[in-house]
Image (spheres, rainbow, N blue to C red):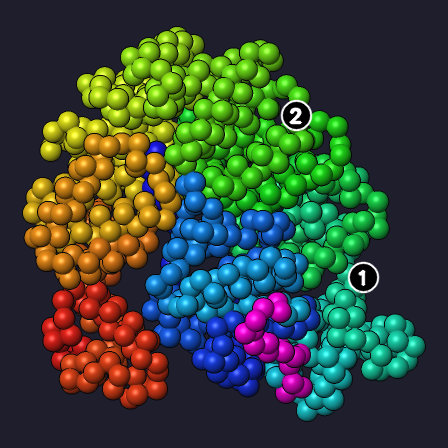
Amino acid sequence: MGFGFGFGQRRGGHLPVELTSFVGRAEELALARGALERARLVTLVGPGGVGKSRTALRVAAGVGERFPDGVWLAELSELRDPELLPATLAAVLELPEQSGMKPLDAVVAHLQGRRLLIVLDTCEHLVDGCAMLSDILLREAEGVSILATSRQPLDVPGEHCLQIAPLARDDALELFVQRARAVVPGFAVADGDQGQLRALVDRLDGIPLALELAAVRLRAVPLAELVARLDRRFEVLTGGRRTALTRHQTLRTAIGWSHELCTPEERSLWARLSVFAGSFELAAAERVCAGGELQAGGVLEPLIGLFDKSVVQRVGQDGGRYRLLDTIREYGADRLEESGGGAAVRERHFAYLRDLGVRFEEGFFTPRQTELHHEARAGIADLRAALEYAYESGVPGRAEEGLRLAARLWPHWRARGALSEGRYWIEKGLERVPGDCPARAWGLLVTGMFGVWNADLALALERTRQAEEVAARVGRETETVGPIARGYIGGLRALCGEVSFEEGLAMVEVERQLLLACDDLLGIALHHYEGALVRAVLGDVPGALELCEVGLARLEETGERQMHASTLGAYGLISWLAGDRTESPARLRQALEEVAGIGEVLVAGLCCLGLSWSAAYEKRYVRAAWLLGYAENAQRLHSAPIGLLPSVLREQESVRKEIRVALGGPQFERWRVVGARLSGPEVLEAVRGDVDTPGAVPGPRGGVRRGGADALTRREREVAALVAQGLSNREIAERLVISKRTADAHVEHILAKLGVGSRGEIPAGPDA
């Protein structure tokens, strides 16, 4: 049980670093920035490969100061199911959606009262879903603006479309020359080369992706031969007419030309790599793409060749992962279908992801747990693709395997705060696997567990009962489903009033002893962590503390962190309610530290709630206010099952009143809002640094990000200087040519960053 806490996500306003130079587009950038001042939805429209995404990111970077709550990038190229759009956006916004609240409702609630820009990149394959999402956000959250990229308009009321055309000739020449110099050191343009360069960029219609692919060929052939070969190819395709190809055909032709210049092994690998929906590692490519003329040991060389030709890109901080651009992937997928080998490659792709699920389950209670979480996060796009394939392929047995894969990943869904997505995939599998089998028993049990964590006790009781019944009929491979389910049933029946507290606890205890006897770590972890919370709710605090101690002792030796931190967090909260003011905060801080390594979201909110009580007990009321603000915001957004813990509710309300009285209403509200707007990493660093105000926090790489004037952006420093001169917010808006609302938001953020309570406390000369 608990609230959302988004660890390890990219902060709002942190757009990807540009790895190559940006050329041209001055007019489009100015038009887009101007359009965002007049319209709240601006869509950059153009053909594939024309540079819509790069242009959008450059626009977003240039308007960030208009949006006090950040610029948030949602890259949609890897997403295939429109139903997952709200959950994907929730993850981008560092908004775990593990409650009974639908992801879209949680996103809307989170965005109301905030002023931010959302970049929806690559919408064309989800155009209806993106249109519906954009329409709802624009209507329900008036401070939100959207910058979208798509090959076609979204057709949403109020949308402003801006066509992104291919580069003008001079800019296209500059781009080609820059990319040529990157691949051929010392590349220079002689006077006699100008005509050939102009012919080349004209033939490629100024399409950036086509130009970049062509530039790579200079490694192998001189410019004159490159132009001649390309010219001959286009004349063959157009019957000698130089203008007959559309821009879409031009790009496809340029990609096809690059394809023809590849070796047979490289072409084969290109086609097979198209089954990866997201990024991949070499080991995955060797497992999925090997076969026939490509053996596992023979994948590396053609992969290097494709990288050298800019067909494959490296991604990630360490460069250990690769990906195909969308247009390149589409071309490869067509070649794969033509080859007739697509079914075998997709089968190997599914098998690889199925085995990832097996490794995740088998290695969960080991020190490898953190590594497995990271592997699942990095592979989420391909996990989705594998689940979709399992359910839709029609291959006998695949749907059952897909259901088991989705259920095996329950710790991943929980850690990402994506219970709704996990439930979506499991429910889809349950629909396709109606008969009794181990996969169905596990799917029912996991959705029952999700019901507990979402405070949907009716669903939890229904599903755990069904899981126990299926497990009893199946028997084999579900031995532990039965006792885990029956333990849940006992506690849930007591909470729902079907049986007395004593009867419910007795049922739970029988199953706990059975799980201890067979040393089932999953059952032990769940029953001691959640059983402790149930006992605390039912009034048996000593019994609850004993369960925590037993569970921690058993989990400590495994090296796993997710369930250990969950149990430790419950231990800290229950021990505080039992009157322990010394050990409880230390346990909560340790639990918070442990969940940070894997991005666990369920327990961290409760840890912050307990730590706010500790801060108030120490009379550190500012610290208590922002910790409480974070925890209460999580409650509001996620409908976390706090209502199941009446003693927690009473303590929360008592501490809230104490903090408000100590700080005064305005100061309490200000610091509560500061806490509500902190990200997971910021809260972790503030707790780790034991600071009273989250403005002076040790940075994630050991540096110190200080509060005060040096924490302000350039625009905020300008606003602060004008405030210090005595100008009103309206006068500031007129002076800086911004809206009054934007000026108000800037002043509010400056007050929070500087840690002062009024405009009069903003120091003169904030640049100092």
Quarter of the rendering occupied by the N terminus: top left
Q: Which residue is mark 2?
A: 434
448 vs 350, left or right, is left
Residue at 57% in and 60% down: 132
Q: Within the magenta stretch, is there residue 156?
A: yes
Where disc 2 sits, the SS reads loop
Q: Which residue is mark 1?
A: 260
121 vs 143, left or right, is right
Q: Eyeballing the image, is 743 above or below 469?
A: below
Residue at 38% in and 56% down: 110
Neighbourhood count class around disc 2 (C-alpha, 10 Å): few under 14, some 14–19, many 20 upward: few
230 vs 548, left or right, is right
Q: Eyeballing the image, is 3 above or below 759?
A: above
Question: In front of the other: label 1 or label 2?
Answer: 2
Q: Nearer the viewer, residue 421 or 106?
A: 106
Q: Nearer the viewer, residue 233 or 646?
A: 646
Quarter of the rendering occupied by the C terminus: bottom left
Residue at 40% in and 9% down: 514
| Residue 455 in view here | yes
Residue segment shown in magenta: 154-170
Where's residue 259, x and y in %? 77, 61
Residue at 39% in and 60% down: 111
